[in-house]
Amino acid sequence: MNSPSDRPPAIVTAALVIIGNEILSGRTQDANLAYVARRLTEQGLQLAEVRVVADVEAEIVSAVNLCRERYDYVFTTGGIGPTHDDITARAIARAFGIDVERHEGAAALLHDHYGQSINEARLSMADLPKGAALIDNPVSRAPGFSMDNVFVLAGVPRIMQAMLDGILPQLKAGNPVMSRTLNAFIGEGEVAQGLSVVQEAHGDVEIGSYPFFHQGEFGVSLVLRSVDTQALNHAVAETAALLQSLGVVPEEREK
Amino acid sequence: MNSPSDRPPAIVTAALVIIGNEILSGRTQDANLAYVARRLTEQGLQLAEVRVVADVEAEIVSAVNLCRERYDYVFTTGGIGPTHDDITARAIARAFGIDVERHEGAAALLHDHYGQSINEARLSMADLPKGAALIDNPVSRAPGFSMDNVFVLAGVPRIMQAMLDGILPQLKAGNPVMSRTLNAFIGEGEVAQGLSVVQEAHGDVEIGSYPFFHQGEFGVSLVLRSVDTQALNHAVAETAALLQSLGVVPEEREK
């Protein structure tokens, strides 16, 4: 990990690998992507890519290895329980080319948590890649862990959230991205040409256009994002002027 | 496309590529993954992988090209509107190494829909990869399209849903996967060992184990899936017997 004295780099990137057949089959609606995206963004980390992969070792290995080379951090969710379909720890070990071994600290936590109900299946949750660092699970004790820049989290949302909230303060933070949103009741197609002029003039501001339909009327949310407050404010002012020139009054929504 | 007389292959695979900075920043909660997963599964298609990528041409090209080689079908959502951040058509053309040109049929639909309010930005939604086939958009007329095995859909959920529902009957269907779910109030760790024995004995049945917490009690949903009804029923019977041997009464939930 980087020491706290490291200067924050402009952009810190991350990928999320969601592991689970139940998401791909439509049985379970994923609730982790939205939470991870929001929390990383608040922290100044840029979530650059998300993959949802099946409970298949080769798929997990491939996704994790591509992402850990490419991004500063990789988060995975799912597959850390005691049953046969929980193969994440083994897959991460394979991705790093190392063995799995029983982590004594994790085993002690599980013994402590389960008492008389401990059994081999439950203890197998302590079988982690050699050298893994534990991630605290204040809810169910099934251990999350990190290896290098890969953070292995639970799939159950409230456990995943507790784990993520616990580790975020330890990560290097990027420059926070500021965001301002202008809403207006106007078609996207009316504002498109002028908006592309504003975008061209402000390469350091990312402008997104998202149509909406509210109480029978079409409108558009224009979302401007930048790490540079001054650049952001200039681009917002120009966008507001554009909307006024088209005859609508933009409403700013804090986001 | 395949002729309807083609014999259905055992497994028809698909990937979903969700295009949109707004999903990655956490501004917008994706609602398309769950719908696509459920509908494809109903249709007997196996959603094998999902990727969420940014509004960056090279990212879209790379994801689409990898997925269209690997899977029978690729669906994309997002980026087909009239603004500068709608770059999907251009990216798909680049992925196929072909040019974009104005699709006369799409342009006519847009003229018809917008009447006097037509403008160049709106018409640009008809700039599609050469040879693309239109996908009907009964809601807003922004054209979706297909190129070979890639289906380009809107990002707005109700438009995406209408488009997907329209094209699904034209796709080759796989053998439908049947699913049965047994719920029981027992810890995953209690059932894990016996369940892995059932899984080993039934390679043609996929058994997933999903813990839940309901009214203060921990329980587990065991989801068994197979294209083979008889194999599925055998595995369900063994799983039910396992749960009974552990002192709990499984409740079957149709899923």
Image (spheres, coloured by chain):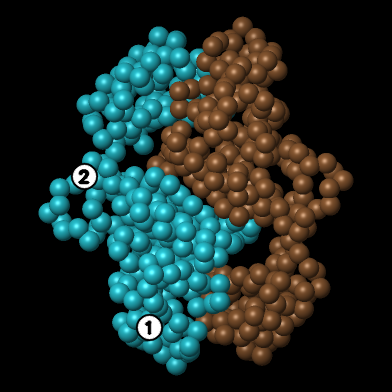
Chain colours: A brown, B cyan
Asked if marks 2 and 1 touch (Cβ < 8 Å), the reply is: no
Q: Is residue B227 above or below residue A107?
A: below
Give the residue displayed 61% in from the left and 35% down from the top: A152
Give the residue displayed 36% in from the left and 30% down from the top: B206
**Residue B187 position in % (x across, y down):** 53, 19
Q: CA distance from mark 2 to mark 1?
A: 36 Å
Q: Is residue B183 above or below residue A204?
A: above
Residue A176 seen from this side: no
View extreme (left): residue = B5
Identified by mark 1, the residue type is Arg
Query: In terms of image quadrants, where is residue A80?
Result: top right
Query: In terms of image quadrants, where is residue B196?
Result: top left
View extreme (bottom): residue = B116
**Residue B168 position in % (x across, y down):** 29, 57
Image quadrant in which the C terminus of chain B is located: top left
Residue B239 seen from this side: yes
Give the residue displayed 74% in from the left and 61% down from the top: A177
Disc 2 designates what residue? B9
Disc 1 designates what residue? B102
**Residue A135 position in % (x across, y down):** 69, 30
**Residue B213 position in % (x across, y down):** 56, 28
Give the residue displayed 36% in from the left and 56% down from the top: B68
Mark 2 or 1 closer to N-term?
2
The residue carrying pointer 2 sits among few (fewer than 14), some (14 to 19) or many (20 or more) residues within 10 Å by Cα, namely few
Identified by mark 2, the residue type is Pro
Q: Is residue A145 above or below residue A227?
A: above
View extreme (right): residue = A5
Q: Are marks 2 and 1 on the same chain?
A: yes
Q: Secondary structure at mark 1?
A: strand
